[in-house]
Image (cartoon, helix red, strand yellow):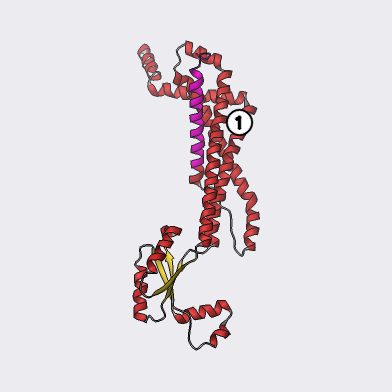
Amino acid sequence: MLRIRKNNQQRDDNSFFPRWKRQIHYAWQNVYNDFRQHAIASLLTIIVIAISITLPTIGYLLWKNANQAAHQWYPTPNLTVYINKTLNQKDTDNLIKQITQFPEVERVNYLSRDETLQEFKLWSGFSEALELLDENPLPAVAIIMPKDEAKQTAILHAIQTEIVKLKGVDDVRLDDSWFTRLTTFTDMVKTIVWTISIFMMIAVALVIGNSIRLAIFSRRQTIIVMQLIGATDGFILRPFLYSGMFNGFISAILALILSEIFIFRIDAIILNVSSVFGTIFNLEGLNWDESLFIILIATMIGWLSALLATKKYLNMPHIN
């Protein structure tokens, strides 16, 4: 009975999940031992990787907050429709109804001739001069607020072209100069951030790959012995893959901390600058989704660069 119980226990220990658990534990034990034996070199590698991740992260934060500031400080782009002064109220209502039916239009604010005159007196400073006129020289206007998906220069110009053809419309004005400049600026910042991110990801992959190659060279005799006794490539690869993932993961965490420190340090400066413009603006850091995405990307880069480096050097003659 005791022999049967031992045999069953041995079969259970040699089943898939116990063997897989032991291999995982062995791999992480190797990662820990290697980190402890080369603590200073490992920390320096992690710091270099973290700085490489921090630079594009800060660039993304600047682009993100620039977009937010643009929406806060600048008005929504709109079109101003100048209605013919000879139109009666019924025709004007029909015209407003036609404009409202455009799919790109969210809403239309109508100002009668009297309302436009009052607005002009309020903002122009020529109220006394206007009192001398026999009649109101200003037309009624319709201010068109486009939908969010229509707030693009090409779409706004297309709407302008269509509305100016309507009967009773004298002119349609679109003040999109600031909008074009803002769109161009944010697109430029976005392109710069993506370019820096690509170069930094390549740098991260190279740094992790180089650290893995150094680890392979320092343990090449051990690898040769493991191959001689029949260890599979997967068993040999696993500690190095986990090491690359570990470096990417810890570096991403450190990069997130550095990014938050950056936001905290310059938030007071930005607050003082925004108060000069008569508004309050606080910088926003990374949310949970963005932070998780950065951690996953860094971990995947660490795994992939470790895989490529290990595969390459395991196939070299001096390793085999």
Residue 165's quadrant in the figure? bottom left
Residue at (41% x, 70% y) in the render: 108
Q: Can residue 285 be seen at all in this image of the molecule?
A: no
34, above or below 4, in the image: below
Kindly identify the residue that appears in the image at 55 percent across and 45 percent down.
Answer: 192
User: What is the magenta range?
Assistant: 292-320
Query: In the rendered view, would you say 76 is above or below 126?
Result: above
296 on left or right of 16? right
Rendered location of residue 244, percent (x, y): 52, 29
Q: Position of residue 252 (x, y in %)?
A: 55, 38
Q: Amino acid at mark 1?
A: Thr
Residue nearest the observer in this picture, 111 or 302: 111
Q: Is residue 313 magenta?
A: yes
Name the one closer to the observer, 22 or 88: 88
Q: Give the secondary structure at mark 1.
A: helix
Is 30 on the left-hand or right-hand side of 108? right
The residue at 54%/80% (across/down) is 121
Of 96 and 307, the residue lying toward us: 96
Q: Residue at label 1?
A: 45
